[in-house]
Amino acid sequence: MRAKKKYTRKHKLFRRVFITLLSLILLVVVFYELTVRDRLELSIIAQIKTICAESINDAVDDYLSENSGIENSMITISNDENGNLKSITENVYTVNRFKVDVSDKSQKYINDVLRKHGIFVKLGNFSGLSLISDMGPDVYLDVDATATVNCKITNKFESAGMNQTLHYTILTIYSDVYVGNPIRIESIKYKTSFEISQSVVIGEIPSTYGLISRYRE
């Protein structure tokens, strides 16, 4: 009889300990989902956008250095006998090559940084308290993330005074980073633009003008 009572007491104690531990685990999970997760997500997003900005800048600088003058060969501007802007001819091959090469280089730079260096967040972010969220030592997070990059090139014209027009070539780069671990984030979008060339066109801009595409190998 005593052995049975002793067994019953141990069984009850085990149940209490088990329920207490399970409750603590559930509380930790709920606390993480409601507070810590949001702060970690904001920190990861901010750092990935910084990585995108720095990697894209490096990629564009490196590409323009490796392919000197390519930004000036994307379009040909011609004037009529009166000096007015007649046509703008786009070298489609050069433009498409530029966009593909810059996209690939930017994408590689971003992914290399994410895979080799990961993400560092302050220990305070794990507390869930805004007061100390940016305090404490850095904690390394091995991030499972993949970037995709696309480019767009546009031409901009501005009047520069008597019978002169400024022509700008604008490169806009769009990046999407998908994060699968430690926090699943569907897409972190980053966009930036560069003025890659500027020239003075002799002649006034007509009220309407067309961009003629030309393929050239």
Image: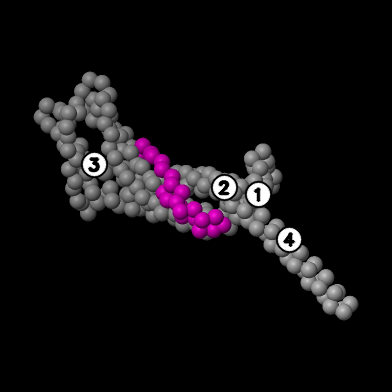
**What amino acid is at disc 2?**
Asp
Residue 196 on image: x %, y %: 35, 39
Q: Is residue 47 visible?
A: no
How many residues crowd around disc 2 within 10 Å: few (fewer than 14), some, or many (20 or more)? Answer: some
Which is nearer the eye, 44 or 34? 34
**Label 3, label 1: how many angstroms apart (C-alpha)?**
53 Å
Quadrant for the C terminus, please.
bottom left
The numbered mark, 2 or 1, whose residue comes first in the sequence reads 2
**What amino acid is at disc 3?**
Ile
Q: Is residue 150 above or below residue 192?
A: below
Q: Residue at x 11, y 26 (%)?
A: 82
**What amino acid is at disc 4?**
Thr
Q: Give the magenta range.
A: 175-196
Which is nearer the eye, 50 or 129? 129
**Label 3, label 4: how many angstroms apart (C-alpha)?**
72 Å
Disc nearest the viewer among 2 and 4: 4
> In the shown orientation, is residue 50 left or right of residue 62?
right
The residue most toward the front is 1
How many residues crowd around disc 1 within 10 Å: few (fewer than 14), some, or many (20 or more)? Answer: some
In what element is the residue under mark 1?
helix
Residue 56 on image: x %, y %: 44, 46
**Label 2, label 1: how many angstroms apart (C-alpha)?**
10 Å
In what element is the residue under mark 3?
strand
User: What residue sits right under mark 1 in the picture?
Assistant: 126
User: What residue sits right under mark 3 in the picture?
Assistant: 75
Disc nearest the viewer among 3 and 1: 1
Residue 30 on image: x %, y %: 62, 53
Disc nearest the viewer among 3 and 2: 2
**Label 3, label 2: how many angstroms apart (C-alpha)?**
47 Å
Q: Which mark is residue 20?
A: 4
